[in-house]
Image (spheres, rainbow, N blue to C red):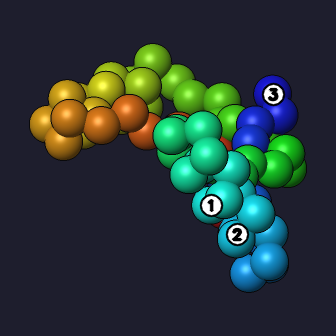
Amino acid sequence: MAAYKIAHISAEEVQKIQELEKELGVCALAMAPGLELAELSEEDLKKIRKLESEMGVNLVVYREC
């Protein structure tokens, strides 16, 4: 399954996004397609869920970095 990652953007593009954020009063993330989500066993999912619970975060796990 395809997934998105944080986009690599230029300083000019960052500025454009920041201007839009300020105008709209929001926070935006620039995402780009390109990674595959990992296929995990039930045992692996349990480990991930345990760590998510301990840390209070959600993890997105990709096949490779």
Q: CA distance from mark 3 to mark 2?
A: 28 Å
Coordinates of residue 21 in the picture (x, y in percent): 59, 49
What number is the disc on residue 1? 3
Question: Mark 1 falls on what kind of element?
Answer: helix
Residue at image point 31% right, 26% down:
49
Which callout, 3 or 2, points to the residue nearer the camera?
Answer: 2
Label 2 environment density (alpha carbons within 10 Å; few <14, some 14–19, many ≥20): some
Q: Quadrant of residue 7?
A: bottom right
Question: Mark 2 falls on what kind of element?
Answer: helix
Left or right of residue 62, residue 25 in this image: left
Which callout, 2 or 1, points to the residue nearer the camera?
Answer: 1
Mark 2 and 1 residues: CB-CB less than 8 Å, in contact? yes
Left or right of residue 55, residue 11 in this image: right
Residue at image point 20% right, 35% down:
56
Q: Which residue is mark 1?
A: 18
Q: CA distance from mark 1 to mark 3?
A: 31 Å
Q: Mark 3 vs mark 2: which is more N-terminal?
A: 3
Which callout, 1 or 3, points to the residue nearer the camera?
Answer: 1
Left or right of residue 44, residue 38 in this image: right
Camera-nearest residue between 30 and 61: 30
What number is the disc on residue 14? 2
Residue at image point 52% right, 24% down:
41
Amino acid type, residue under disc 2 in the picture: Val
The C terminus: image quadrant: bottom right
Q: Quadrant of residue 58?
A: top left
Residue at image point 43% right, 39% down:
59
Q: Is residue 22 above or below residue 60?
A: below
